[in-house]
Image (cartoon, helix red, strand yellow):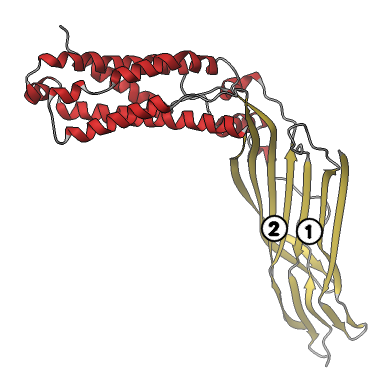
Amino acid sequence: MKPRTRTRVRLAAMGHTLRPTTGDLGPYPYTELDAEIVDFIEKGRREDGLTPPSPLTIFSRTVNPPGLTHYQKHKTQPLAAYHGVNLPCTQPFAVGPVGVPPSGWASIEPSDEQIRQRGLSNSNPLRYEVSVPVMVAELIETASLFAVTLSNLSSAVGSTYLNVKFGWMSLISDIESMVKLLAGIESRIKELNSLIKKGGVRRKVSISKKAVVVPFSNRACYSNSYSTWYSDGTITYSSRVWLTVRWKPQRDKMLEVQRLVASREELLKILLGFKRNRSVQIWEAIPFTWIIDYFTGLQETLQAIENSDLVVPFDICVMRERRIQVSTRVRPKSRDDTYYGYSYATPGTVDIVMKRRETDLTSSDAFHDLLRFGILTPGQAQTIMALLLSRRKGRIRI
């Protein structure tokens, strides 16, 4: 890669003055735009066919100065002593170096480590949220409790016993929860298979967006031989941070999901049957043994996935966009006594945009666990625990 720097400056002019001694002067020049871009060119493609990301900095400043108009005349003279029309006034950071927030940019931006933590945690397509071995054990136990409970219903007498002993509607609700859990697990496995099939995915994650406003007052913005004008206004410092990362799976073999789909569809059919038939035979038809067999067979595979870095982050880029916006108002003046006249001014602005891309960020052990595979959300794990508790309480002991 080869570094490159490009700059641009645009000048403008406005306003004029009229004095009896000098005549009509103006317009007066000012810098309306200055910009700089530092990037890299001649980047070669890697073995995977992609162009590697590179550092980038962009600076852009646009200035719209306040336009001051004022008129002064001596009461004994026939001509105006000074007449200025739309004269450009100065503003904070309109030229030269720019400032920073009172407590620095770090006061409104997270640290580099926080950016990486949040970015990798929220962008990982297979985020590590619940331990796979723990999840599988709890899910098998849940299905086992259902199977044992339901097998003992062969000695029950119709739905009356179910209503008294178990709470029919509560049990139906539990079965519905199981259907939703299977759908969530099915979706996550399909997401993994899609990632493996595509060979990776690129994600963008918003990290933070904050701003602070700092007022200023009584700042000299224009002077001539007659007087000095002052201005008031605000400086707004804002920051937006985001992270982009490409995730690539190490595993190349997709997981079988058809058995899980069949179990979920069978449960759905039986749930529909509850509305028409409440017999014990319906309960005994629920395919909990299928679910137990499925996850027992899948357990070793899922454990192996968690024990390895299934998806690896690379091409990690942190982007920072910092803006400084200045808003300026000039204080007007009135003349009396020997000189009389008037003054007014249009408001002015300065808009500064600074963008920076940082690359080649390495992963640290502090967020190694964020790179692992997770199959359930915390809410789904809580549902499993609730089912375990409810089934243990309602279990028939023979």
Q: Measured along the vertical axis of the image, is residue 54 above or below residue 285?
A: below
Q: Residue at x 82, y 87 (%)?
A: 80
Q: Amino acid at mark 1?
A: Ala
Q: Residue at x 86, y 54 (%)?
A: 7
Which of 335/2 is in front?
2
Q: Residue at x 74, y 43 (%)?
A: 356
Q: Quadrant of residue 28?
A: bottom right
Residue at which label 1 appears: 94
Which of 75/265 is in front?
265
Evaluate if marks 2 and 1 touch, with contact meaning CB atoms under 8 Å apart: yes
Left or right of residue 103, residue 224 in this image: right
Secondary structure type for disc 2: strand
Q: Measured along the vertical axis of the image, is residue 218 above or below residue 192?
A: below
Which label belongs to residue 326?
Answer: 2
Mark 2 or mark 1, earlier in chain: 1
Q: Quadrant of residue 105?
A: top right
Residue 156 picture location, percent across and down = 9, 17
Left or right of residue 174, residue 299 in this image: right
Real-space Cα separation, disc 2 to disc 1, in angstroms: 9 Å
Query: Would you call the spot at circle 2 few (<14 residues within 10 Å), some (14-19), or many (20 or more)?
Result: many
Residue 263 picture location, percent across and down = 33, 26
Secondary structure type for disc 1: loop
Image quadrant holding the C terminus, namely top left
Residue 192 picture location, percent across and down = 52, 29
Q: Amino acid at mark 2?
A: Val
Q: Quadrant of residue 101?
A: top right
Q: Residue at x 75, y 73 (%)?
A: 68
Residue 129 picture location, percent across and down = 48, 25
